[in-house]
C-alpha cells in the first residue's frame, strides 16, 4: 500500500521550511487505523521503534499476531494439500498467498523470503517471476530500504527481456524511473519518466498524478527551456 507509505514518510522526514505543515496527529490516526484494519503488527513494531509511535495495548498486538499466525498456517496447509492432492499451479497459489500476506502486514524480511520462494519453485513462468521481483521492489520502496534494489531491478530487467509482455516492460520502466529519483540520478530519471507518460500503467506503485508531478519536477531541472515547453507544458499527457 504505497498510499500508506506516503503517510508514514513525513512522520520522520526533515521537510524544508517552505513545505506545508504536516498534521502528524491526523496522520498518526490514519496510520493506526490502517494497521489495525490489516493486522500490520510487524509494521507497527517498526513504527514504535523507528518513528516514536506509542505502543498499542498488548491485547491489540496479540490479536493481530494471532490472526497473522492463523493466515500463515492456512497458507502452509494449503501448500501441503496442493503438494499431495493438486499440481504446480495450486502450490504456486499457496506460496504466493503467503508472500502477499507478509507484504500486506509490513513484514519486510519474510515478505522478501516469500517472493524468493516463488522464484525457486519449479516450472514457474517468466511472467510470475517478473511479478514476484516487482513485488520485492515495491516492498523495498515501501520500507525505504536501498540494499539490493539495484540488483533486484537488474534481475527484473533481464526477466523482462527474456519473456516479459508489453505491460510488464512498461511498468518496470516506471519502477526504474522512481528508483533513479530515489538515488538522485535526476537526469536519467527525467528522461525515463517522460518516456512513460503516454503508457503509464503502474498504478500499484503510485498514482498517475504523482507520476506526472515527478516527471515535471525532474524535467524542469534538466530539459532546456524550449524542449520543456514542447514536451511538458504543451504535452496533452502532462496537462
Image (cartoon, rainbow, N blue to C red):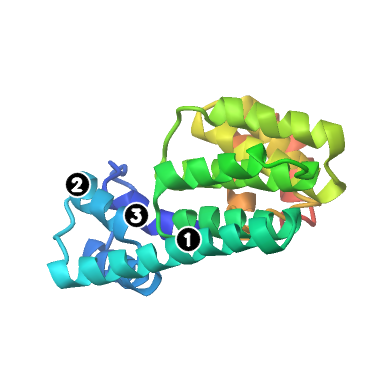
* Helix, strand or loop status at disc 3: helix
Q: Determine whether, in the image, residue 4 is placed left or right of residue 63.
A: right
Q: Position of residue 63 (x, y in %)?
A: 26, 72
Q: Nearer the viewer, residue 213 or 122?
A: 122
Residue that mark 3 sits on: 8
Vertical side of 116 occupied by 150: above or below = above
Residue under label 2: 49
CA separation, marks 3 and 2? Answer: 13 Å
| Residues at discs 3 and 2 in contact (Cβ within 8 Å) | no
- Residue at coordinates 16% horizontally, 51% vertically from top-left? 52
Q: Which residue is mark 1?
A: 3
Question: Image point 44% across, 60% down: which residue?
Answer: 72
Q: Quadrant of residue 53?
A: bottom left
Determine the secondary structure under disc 2.
helix
How far apart are labels 1 and 3 at the CA level?
A: 9 Å
Mark 2 vs mark 1, foreground winner is 2
The answer to whether residue 230 is above or below residue 72 is: above
Q: Nearer the viewer, mark 3 or mark 2?
A: 2
Q: Is residue 99 visible?
A: yes
Please indicate, yes or no, whether residue 57 appears anywhere in the rendered image: no
Residue 51 left/right relative to 190: left
Report the residue at 67% width, 27% height from top: 154
Q: Residues within 10 Å of mark 3 (few under 14, many from 20)?
A: many
Q: SS of the residue at dot 1?
A: helix
Q: CA distance from mark 2 to mark 1?
A: 21 Å
Q: Pointer 1: residues within 10 angstroms few (<14), some, or many (20+)?
A: few
The image position of residue 74, as x and y in percent, is 48, 66
Residue under the point 79% across and 45% down: 125
Kindly indicate whether the residue at mark 1 contacts the one at mark 2 (C-beta within 8 angstroms): no
Amino acid at each position: 500500500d504505497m498510499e500508506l507509505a506516503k503517510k508514514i514518510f513525513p512522520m520522520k522526514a526533515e521537510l524544508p521550511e517552505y513545505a506545508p505543515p504536516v498534521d502528524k496527529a491526523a496522520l498518526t490516526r490514519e496510520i493506526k487505523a490502517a494497521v489495525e484494519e490489516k493486522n500490520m503488527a510487524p509494521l507497527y513494531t517498526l513504527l514504535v521503534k523507528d518513528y516514536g509511535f506509542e505502543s498499542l495495548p498488548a491485547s491489540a498486538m496479540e490479536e493481530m499476531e494471532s490472526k497473522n499466525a492463523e493466515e500463515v498456517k492456512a497458507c502452509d496447509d494449503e501448500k501441503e494439500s496442493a503438494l499431495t492432492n493438486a499440481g504446480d499451479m495450486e502450490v504456486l497459489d499457496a506460496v504466493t498467498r503467503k508472500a502477499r500476506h507478509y507484504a500486506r502486514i509490513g513484514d519486510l524480511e519474510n515478505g522478501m523470503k516469500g517472493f524468493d520462494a516463488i522464484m525457486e519453485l519449479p516450472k514457474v513462468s517468466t511472467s510470475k517471476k517478473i511479478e514476484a521481483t516487482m513485488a520485492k521492489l515495491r516492498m523495498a520502496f515501501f520500507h525505504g530500504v536501498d540494499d539490493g534494489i539495484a540488483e533486484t531491478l537488474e534481475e527484473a530487467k533481464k526477466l523482462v527481456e527474456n519473456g516479459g509482455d508489453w505491460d510488464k516492460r512498461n511498468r518496470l520502466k516506471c519502477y526504474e524511473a522512481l528508483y533513479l529519483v530515489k538515488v538522485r540520478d535526476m537526469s536519467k530519471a527525467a528522461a525515463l519518466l517522460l518516456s512513460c507518460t503516454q503508457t503509464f500503467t503502474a498504478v500499484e506503485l503510485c498514482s498517475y498524478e504523482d507520476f506526472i508531478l515527478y516527471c515535471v519536477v525532474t524535467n524542469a531541472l534538466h530539459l532546456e527551456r524550449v524542449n520543456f515547453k514542447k514536451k511538458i507544458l504543451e504535452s496533452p499527457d502532462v496537462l
